[in-house]
Amino acid sequence: MSIVESIKKAAEKLTGIARPGTSRLADLVRQRKANAFRFKDDGLVPNHPSWPLIVYRGAVTLPDDLDPAAVFEELFKANGWGGSWRNGIYDYVHYHSRIHEVLGIARGTAKVRFGGDKGRALTVKAGDVAVLPAGTGHQRLSASDDFLVVGAYPPSGTYDECTKPEQHAEALRMIPKVSRPRNDPVYGRDGPLLKAWGER
């Protein structure tokens, strides 16, 4: 996270300025179709054996009077996803074997390849949300100068970062153990994610 974003985040938390209240937050969420993408194990990136990547296009309205990153932080927190951060997406292939991750696009646009080298490149833009089940590879291929992402995690799971072939075997054991989240990070208890990630 840049120093500017760190200072902005701290000031907003202290003052509440540019952060949406609960009622305003509900008005910013738009019902969107869950676009599902499934990826196979490519030998380096295992991806998830059962659950797809979910992308909600234009799921969140980002008005000029609010900090877009704060909108995503508050939305994810309201739905039980925490540990939020502000940054970009790494330019190398990586995945998390012990936790799911949500990425809210707060500013700009980027081309991101999901699923590893044999996966799929998608263009994401401000207002989009991607929910990655444990094991899903992701890598930024290109981005606008103002590209900013807010990431967060469900309460169960442990953060890890996997990039090496020797991590693959252990990841295959760990990924199925990561439990389904109780809430969709955007739509809560009745969100499309929960249907897409049905019980195994």
Image (cartoon, rainbow, N blue to C red):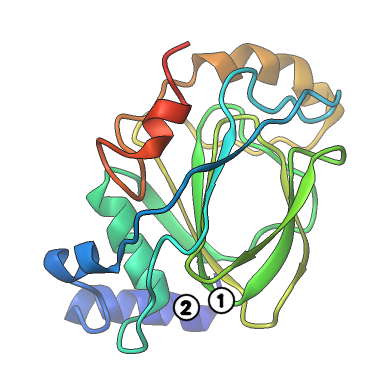
Q: Outermost residue, left direction? A: 23
Which numbered circle lies on residue 191? none
**Quadrant hosting residue 169:** top right
Is residue 74 left or right of 5 when viewed as pictured?
Answer: left
* Amino acid at dot 2: Glu
**Quadrant hosting residue 182:** top left
**Residue at image coords 30%, 89%:** 65
The answer to the question of whether label 2 and label 1 lie on touching residues, with beta carbons closer than 8 A, is yes
Is residue 51 left or right of 16 when viewed as pictured?
Answer: right
Residue holding disc 1 = 2
**Residue at image coords 18%, 81%:** 15
Residue holding disc 2 = 5
> At which x and y percent is residue 33?
46, 47
Label 2: how many residues lie within 10 Å, few (<14), some (14-19) or many (20+)? some
Q: Quadrant of the N terminus?
A: bottom right
**Residue at image coords 26%, 36%:** 190
* Amino acid at dot 1: Ser
**Residue at image coords 46%, 25%:** 197
> At which x and y percent is residue 110?
69, 68
Residue nearer the viewer, 19 or 53: 53
Compared with 32, 51 (above or below) is above
Is residue 168 left or right of 151 when viewed as pictured?
Answer: right
Q: CA distance from mark 2 to mark 1?
A: 5 Å
> At which x and y percent is residue 100?
50, 35
**Quadrant hosting residue 137:** top right
> At which x and y percent is residue 114?
72, 45
